Amino acid sequence: MKIKILLPIILLLGLGSCKKTLEEHPKSIAAEDFYNTPAEVESGLDAIYSPLRDPNNLGAIYQTQLECYADYMYGRGSHAVLNNYQGLDNTNITRVGTIWQLFYQSIRNANIIIQKTPLAKSVADTAKSRYIAEARFMRGLGYFFLVRNWAGVPLRTEANMDSINLKRSTAQDVYAQIVSDLTFAETNLPNAPRLIGAPSKWSAKTVLADVYMNMGLYSNARDEALAVIQSGNFSLVNVGIVSDFDKLYGADVVNSTEEIFYLKFARAPAGQGNYYPMYAFYPNSGYYPPGGYYTFYSDSVNNGVLSTWDRKDLRYSYNWYGQTFGLGNTTVLNKKYVDKQAVTAAGNDYPMYRYADLLLLYAEAEMRVNNGPDADAMEKLNMVHRRAYGKDPLTANPTVDFALADYASADTFLTLVVKERGYEDCSEGKRWLDLKRLGIVKRVILAVKGITVADKHLLWPIPTTEYNYNKAINPATDQNPGY
C-alpha cells in the first residue's frame, strides 16, 4: 500500500519575481515516488520550517511564554501565573505540550529528508550533501530548543523515527546529537544560503557557538564565533535615530547585513504571518491594526531593569511605549515588532541569531577562556553598545564606550555582558534561557521581582501526549521534577 505525505504550505517571505524565497505549494504524493529531484527534495526541506513558524510555537506562543519569565516583563491573563515562578498550571502545561509536538513535527520532517535524500535518483552527490546538511542543521536546532526547556528528551532520528516507544535520552546525549548535526552542517552547508531564510555554514557556526556556551565549552564557542566574525560576511546595521532599528526588525525588511539566521514571516498570503505582535500590543495602539492581547507588560519606574535603563540608549525608546490599562501610569508595553500594515498577522521576522548576538557571545567566551576580559572582548561588546547610542559601531567613542579598566574582573565583565544582552535581545525570547545558562536566574528574579523561583519552574513537563503513547517513558519516574 502506498503511503501518502501531505506537505504543508510554507512561504518564508514573498520577495517578488527577482528574489529567491522558501516557498512550497501543497502536494499529495506517494513517498516512494518523491524525493528524487532537487525540486522535490527542496519542497521537503521547506516543510521542516512550517511547524516552527506555527502560531503555537515560534510564531507567537513560544516567545510569549519565555518573555513572561524575563526579569523585565510580567504576564497577564492566563499567562499571569507565570509571574509566580512556581511552575505551570494546566492551561500553560497544554501550551508547552503543543510546543513540544511542533518541534518534533519539524524534527520528523528533517529526518525524512536525511533518510530519503541519499536515494534520490536525479540529485548530484554534492547537492545531496547540502540538502542533508540543511536538514541536520534544522534538526540540531530543534533539539537545542527542546533540551534547554525540557532537559533530556527522546532522540528521534532517521534511524528510529517510526518507533513510538523511545526512552528519554540524557541531556548530555541530546547535546552530543546536536553537536554532531551542526558540525556536519557547518562542513557541508554553502557560504550563502540556498534561499533567504535558509541556513548557511555561518548559521551553523553561530548556533554551534551558542550550543558550546550552554555546554560550558568556552574555547570551542570562542573559536566558532571568531570564525564567523573573521569571515567578513556580517556587520552591524548602522543606527542614527530610534526608527533606524526598523532596518533590523521592521515588517518590510527582507534581509540585512546583521542577519545570520532569522525565521521568516510575511503578511501575505494568508497563514504566513507572525502572530507574536498580537500578544504584545494594546488594541488601537496604532502599532498593530489587528488588535492585541497585551499579554505581557512592564513598568518603567518600578521594574529594576527598566528603571536603570539609560534613556539615551535608543533601544529603550524603540522597545517601549506607555499604555495604561488599570495597572498604573508607569505601565509600558513592548513595540519591537511594529506592523502598521498588518491585516491578520505581521510581516516581522523572528531574529533568532543576529550579528549582535554573536558579538556578545564572543565577548563572553573570550573572557571565560582568559579568565577575565581583554581588549578584544571589550571591543566586541562596545561595538554593540555604540550602535545602541547611534554611533558608528567600528569607531571608538569615549562618550559611550565602556573602559576595560572599569570591568577588569571576570564577574564585573560578565555582569556587563548580561545587561547588554538584556537590552539588545529584549522581547526576543532569549533572556530566560540566558539567565538559566548562567546559573543566575534565581538570584536575578529575587533581586528584581522579590520572588523565589521554584526548582520545578526551571523546566517544562514532559507532555501527557508523549507518555500516553510512548510507553518507554514512565510518568512516575521519568517526568521532570515537580510535575
Image (cartoon, grey):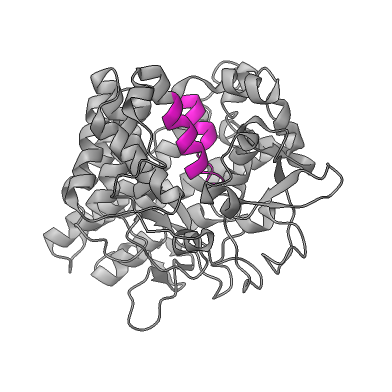
Asked if residue 84 is positioned above or below residue 133 in the image, the reply reads: above
Residue 428 lies within the magenta run: yes
Magenta segment, prevailing SS (helix, strand or loop): helix
Residue 293 or residue 332, whichever sits in front: 332
Q: Position of residue 38 (x, y in %)?
A: 24, 69
Is residue 71 found left or right of 160 in the rendered image?
Answer: right
Q: Is residue 480 visible to the viewer in this orientation of the structure?
A: no
Is residue 410 found left or right of 88 in the rendered image?
Answer: left
Residue 248 or residue 76, whichever sits in front: 248
Q: Position of residue 2 (x, y in %)?
A: 40, 63
Instruction: Using the rendered view, name the quadrant where residue 89 is placed.
Output: top right
Q: How many marks?
A: 0
Location of the C terminus by quadrant is top right
The outermost residue toward the left is 125
Instruction: Using the rendered view, name the quadrant where residue 464 is placed.
Output: top right
Asked if residue 84 is positioned above or below residue 209 in the image, the reply reads: above
Is residue 482 found left or right of 224 in the rendered image?
Answer: right
Q: Position of residue 157 (x, y in %)?
A: 34, 40
Residue 345 or residue 139, whichever sits in front: 345
Is residue 122 found left or right of 97 in the rendered image?
Answer: left
Instruction: Using the rendered view, name the quadrant where residue 413 is placed.
Output: top left
At a point 75% along the width and 57% down the height, the residue shown is 282
The outermost residue toward the front is 399
Location of the N terminus by quadrant is bottom left
Q: Position of residue 36 (x, y in %)?
A: 24, 67
At a point 62% along the width and 59% down the height, the residue shown is 275
The outermost residue toward the bottom is 17
Asked if residue 107 is positioned above or below residue 178 in the image, the reply reads: below
* The magenta segment: 415-437
Q: Is residue 420 visible to the viewer in this orientation of the structure?
A: yes
